[in-house]
Amino acid sequence: MKQFDTIIIRFGELYTKGKNKKDFVNRLFYNIKNNISYEGIEFIKAHDHIYLEIKQDIDEKNLIDQLKNIPGIYSFSLAYKVKASEEDIIERSYEILKESPTMHTFKVYARRIDKSFPIHSDNINRLVATKILKNSDYKVDVHHPDYLLSIEIRPHFAYIFLRTIKGLGGYPSNTMGGVLMLISGGIDSPVAASLLLKRGVHLEYLHFASPPYTNVAVIDKVKDLLNVISAQQSHVYLHVVPFTKLQEEIYRHVDESYAITIMRRMMIRIACKVAKKRHLLAIATGESIGQVASQTLESMKVISDVADEVILRPLATYDKVEIIKISKEINTYDISIRPYEDCCTIFTPKQPKTKPHLDKVLAFESKFDFSSLVDECVNNVETIKLK
Ligand code: ATP
Ligand code: MG
């Protein structure tokens, strides 16, 4: 089968964005250009589509995979460009179907984007179908055709295609502002990150490390995860918080059953301060309602109480089976399940509070000067620039 010569890219949801649409399309265009690693492709931006004109042989599957991973692309079609003339459209449509792997049924679906084209869509459908029916064994099936032969007629050119592929949807990378993602090295937080990236958010990452209780190899694990999920980002910042001292103080002063609640309040305090320093608009976690003691609504309320930034929880309503499924799809699962000690797991109490009381929390926190320790953590963050 002859290689398609044009890819038609649709934006879908971006249509609803009114005057922002232009900026979104420009950003998407830029992201596509930057992420497609092929020579010999011409990128064309039109008001309703982006076109890739392919001037030489490419690895089709690889190019399709690259496009499938770019947020903001709603769908794309692998098309053949022909002159917008009755004869060319009919001949090429027939040839394209003939050259494709043999099937049984088809339907023609023509649209005139250029209304000045002299033949009505219905008539084009009929003319093309007649040519195919006369010259092949194909039958028409208007409800469930094996091939939907689409024809888009524009000024000067028409595009003919049999295959349309669904894209990621969402918004183009870097159109929605920055968020600080708390990343642990487990299964959930990379999945939460990928859902945010798909919404066009730019992410910086924050990791709490508690050496020697946690292994330095965890940092490599987090880096590996970030390399997988942030392929679309041109630069990635990982901020590593030296958390050991504060964590030890928590366990010195706080009842075991309240230690996790208070540790998480410290994490949120630190995260909010780092987010401000980095001019980010929110923080995000991989929490999911009810997953563990610290993720009951009662716990989340007491923990969020210290936040003065918005906390996004993309996985709030996901169950673990769904999260694991996504982590396999985005290729983070195998990295996430590598054994590691998280700073949350090392001091895990036997009976963490599922319904912590704010007054008790405040009483424990009044026993030590945590705010200077929090500031020390913020001031000693080590920022690693990846890529
Ligand atoms: P994950 O699979 O992402 O580790 P989890 O199910 O293990 O999540 P928790 O350990 O309770 O859940 O953590 C909840 C969220 O808190 C994580 O999704 C992450 O956003 C954040 N978090 C936990 N530990 C760390 C850490 N060491 N550094 C940064 N963020 C963390
Ligand atoms: Mg974890």
Image (cartoon, grey):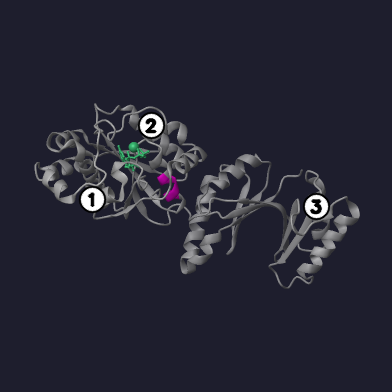
Ranked by sequence position, the earlier of labels 1 and 2 is 2
User: What residue would you read off at disc 1?
Assistant: 302
370 left or right of 190? left
Image x and y of residue 278, in percent: 28, 50
Ranked by sequence position, the earlier of labels 1 and 3 is 3
Segment tinted magenta in the rendering: 192-197
246 left or right of 155? left
Image x and y of residue 54, in percent: 66, 48
380 left or right of 90? left
In the rendered image, the quadrant that contains the C terminus is top left
Q: Which mark is residue 105?
A: 3
Q: Main secondary structure of the magenta part?
A: helix
Judged from the image, the secondary structure of the residue bearing numbered disc 1 is: helix
Name the residue nearer the viewer: 123 or 298. 298
Task: Classify 10 Å Cα crowding around label 1: few (below 14), some (14-19), many (20 and above).
Answer: many
Residue beneath the point at 38% across and 48% down: 203
User: Which residue, as the protein is rendered here, is positioned at the far right?
Assistant: 134
